Amino acid sequence: MKEIKTRHNLLEARKKALEQVTHGSIRPHGKLWGMDVFSWMNPDVEALALTIHAFPFPILWLSPSGLLMAVAECDAAIATNIHTVITYDQSSAAEKSGEILHLITTNDIHQAFQKMNALQFKPGIILFCSEGADSEMYQKAFSNYLELHQI
């Protein structure tokens, strides 16, 4: 009986460790155009909502539309901290995201970066999020973009 319990505990610990890897943590990237830059791969929706509320400046958020919808559903007051959201996955579902005043939908990540170029404001925060199977690819594209544009 004790061996079964130990095996179960090991499986639970492994499951929790895998969940922590899947839900990464926020990463700072310094400044871009005088704005603080962060990225987050596969964020937990509740943790992301809390983080958005904790940021001291308006946020320019690049996000897949599904994540935007999940956060808006989790926290109806999320729009108060967001200056602009740019979605980069062709979904029109994000257009119905309630009180977010500035919402830009694009067909791909590179169009999102082009839109971001025109939206510089100080003080401000750029938050880039990705999720799902293509999360690493999007994070790499964002890192490459930063390498080209950060001074």
Image (tube, rainbow, N blue to C red):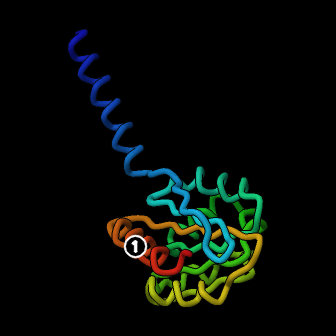
User: SS at mark 1?
Assistant: helix
Taking the image as shown, residue 106 lies to the left or right of residue 120, namely: left
Residue under the point 44% across and 51% down: 23
Residue under the point 43% across and 65% down: 131
Residue under the point 67% across and 71% down: 35
Image quarter in which the C terminus is found: bottom right
Q: Which picture quadrant has residue 68?
A: bottom right
- Residue 42 versus residue 120: which sits nearer the camera? 120
Report which residue position mark 1 lands on.
138
Image quarter in which the N terminus is found: top left
Taking the image as shown, residue 21 lies to the left or right of residue 107, namely: left
Residue under the point 67% across and 85% down: 119
Q: Position of residue 128 (x, y in %)?
A: 54, 69
Neighbourhood count class around disc 1 (C-alpha, 10 Å): few under 14, some 14–19, many 20 upward: many
Taking the image as shown, residue 119 lies to the left or right of residue 17, namely: right
Q: Which picture quadrant has residue 52?
A: bottom right
Q: How many marks?
A: 1
Q: Which picture quadrant has residue 79?
A: bottom right
- Residue 39 versus residue 95: which sits nearer the camera? 39
Q: Position of residue 2 (x, y in %)?
A: 25, 9
Residue type, numbered disc 1: Tyr
- Residue 151 versus residue 80: which sits nearer the camera? 151
Instruction: Check the image and name the residue furthest to the front.
Output: 151
Examine the rendered structure and indicate whether residue 93 appears above or below residue 9: below
Q: Position of residue 41 (x, y in %)?
A: 45, 60
